[in-house]
Amino acid sequence: MKKYILILISVVTLVFSSCDDYLDRPSLTTMNDDTYWTSENSLRLFANGFYANYFNGYNSSFTTDYTPLRGYNFADDFASTGKQGGFETQAPESRSSTSEAAAWLTTYAGPTWNFAWVRKSNLFIERIEAMKDKQVTADVYKHWSAVARFFRGFEYSRLVSVFGDVPYYDRVILETELDLLFKDRDSRTVVMDKVYDDFVYALDNMRALDGSAQYLNKNIAAGFISRFMLFEGTWQKYHMNNPEKAKKYLELAVKAGDIVKASNKYSFTSDFRSLFGSQDLAGNKEVLLYRHYDAALTTTHHIASYSNLTESQTPAPNLKLAKAFVTTDGKPYKLSTLENADKLDIKNMVATRDSRFEATFWDAPKKESSTLLYADKFIDREGVKQYPGPYQSMYGSNTNTNDAPVMRLAEVMLNWVEAKAELATMGGTAVSQGDIDASINAIRNRPLDATAIAKGIKKTAPLTLASLPDDPDRDADVPALIWEIRRERRMEFVFEHTRLMDIKRWKKIDYMKNTDPDNMLGLWVNFQTEYPEWLVAAKVSKLKVKKEDGTIVTYTGTNAADMVGYYIPENISNRDAFTERVYLAPVGNTQINDYKDKGYTLTQTPGW
């Protein structure tokens, strides 16, 4: 498979039922479980059915599940007009799905209470076992059992990130095995120890290359394993105060990163914008896995169109996120000596901040953004030139064809260096300057594209341990190095999958309470010089700015000269109060009652 293109799950749907008498004969049009498993090609086709569920990319058409920008926008990095979106306030009536589609829960950034994919991976494992030493060789067996166990670990990692304790199954359960079908939840540590075993097996047995670089291989698997093991390791540290388990999972995250690093197949040779707007990521050495789109094959998406300066963005990037970007001297803006580093309007921030700021955001206020700061990260430079339209199909509606990076080298290396830093706080080896150079500094040294160079954008200075910044805004309970690593993630992954999951695993969900007023503000704007088109009668009593001293100025129609300050999104108000129970999702009352009706108990998530 030259490029990862979605392969329909229905291609490998299996038949498990039969008819009586003369009707009980093999179907001529549907694959039969008794005759399907004949060769390695059978295994490859079945494995392809997992790709749509786990390697979503920009998803397809107008679907937003697991997509950047349109899906991953519930976090402390973003604000909207009106009341801020909130967490659920009570256990749902039902939290189950019978679909194999990649359904998810927005405020938990993960799957619903559905074990279909666990069963699918267990069935895969069992069929591979039955083929061992018969239809396949030992080497083939090892690789595909590693693939199947990787997918099982993937699914359980996501389920645990959402629900915590979940029932663990390592084989296909029959309909008659009620004690197992309706068993209560196993502890997350028991489950994640099983996941750990699956991941170790995957790293030890998966092929380094399986034909095309876009088929799942050891390096791609290692990238995801670094993600899941970092999540669980830091969860065990910050939530469960379990250093033994934290070290175990974090050490595997480091090992996974080492595998990718040692392969010497990947490097930071791409400019930042090309990672997200390219029409073909083949050959991009920073991308381990990508999803390819092709209009001729009707595989398209809509993410670029929501970066084209015309479509609205809400929620949108807030002032707090913007302030997190370091200046080009490598310092937090409050420590920088760069000229205009303390001026927080878009134009000056583009000129003084890390180059990813310019590559992520449009360089002028846009009314289409609820905060006026518009993200154009997921479209190429040509696409924004077509504003205000008409747009080519690749930049409008749901016919976009830019490729989606599914696993990037930057994530692997930031997972790797964070895991090392966390281990160092628990008695492990200290992070070295070489570690920083291989991760954060290599990322900062990416090439700039022609547009950025023409604007005078410069690369950011390296981070050095000898002169580590001590940000005055740093949380007191976070060491300076870990704070800077977390900052790097924040700059690197705007609107991608990481932010909500990061603040959850760090036990920092209180960031979502918006006690910092910067969370509900846009950047500094002078409406008279930067955005005079909003100084109109329709904005009287609606348009507001906040001065440095906290004074709020409302537009009256006659005070245009005073409309200078941090933009306040219209009618903005805080989200409803919440407690720490929102770290994990409740299960549905229907599911609890289903257990009860059959004489079993399904325990509700703590706090719900």
Image (tube, grey):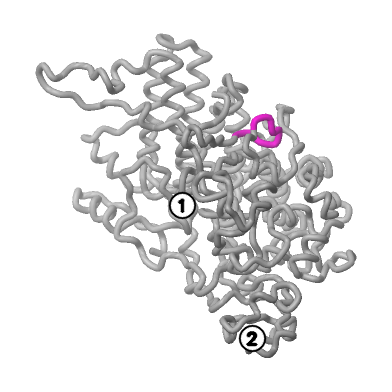
How far apart marks 1 and 2 lie (CA) works out to 44 Å
Position in image of residue 498 (x %, y %): 59, 51
| Rendered residue at 59%/84% (across/down) | 537
Q: Which residue is mark 1?
A: 162
Residue 555 - label = 2
Q: Could you tell me if residue 416 is visible in this image?
A: no
Asked if residue 284 is among those painted magenta in the image, a careful observer would answer yes
Asked if residue 224 is among those painted magenta in the image, a careful observer would answer no
Position in image of residue 262 (x %, y %): 73, 29
Say if 548 sits above or below 298 in the image.
Answer: below
| Rendered residue at 29%/60% (across/down) | 93
Label 1 or label 2, whichever comes before in sequence order: 1
Callout 1 secondary element: helix
Q: Which residues are magenta?
A: 282-289
Q: Could you tell me if residue 522 is visible in this image?
A: yes
Query: Between 597 and 131, which is closer to the camera in this rendering?
Result: 131
Query: Does residue 543 appear left or right of residue 300 in this picture?
Result: right
Mark 2 crowd level (few <14, some 14–19, many ≥20, 10 Å Cα): many
The majority secondary structure of the magenta stretch comes to loop
Position in image of residue 409 (x %, y %): 68, 38
- For the residue marked with disc 1, what is the amino acid? Val
Query: Between 395 and 427, which is closer to the camera in this rendering?
Result: 395
Query: Between 78 and 422, which is closer to the camera in this rendering?
Result: 78
Pair 1/2: label in front: 2
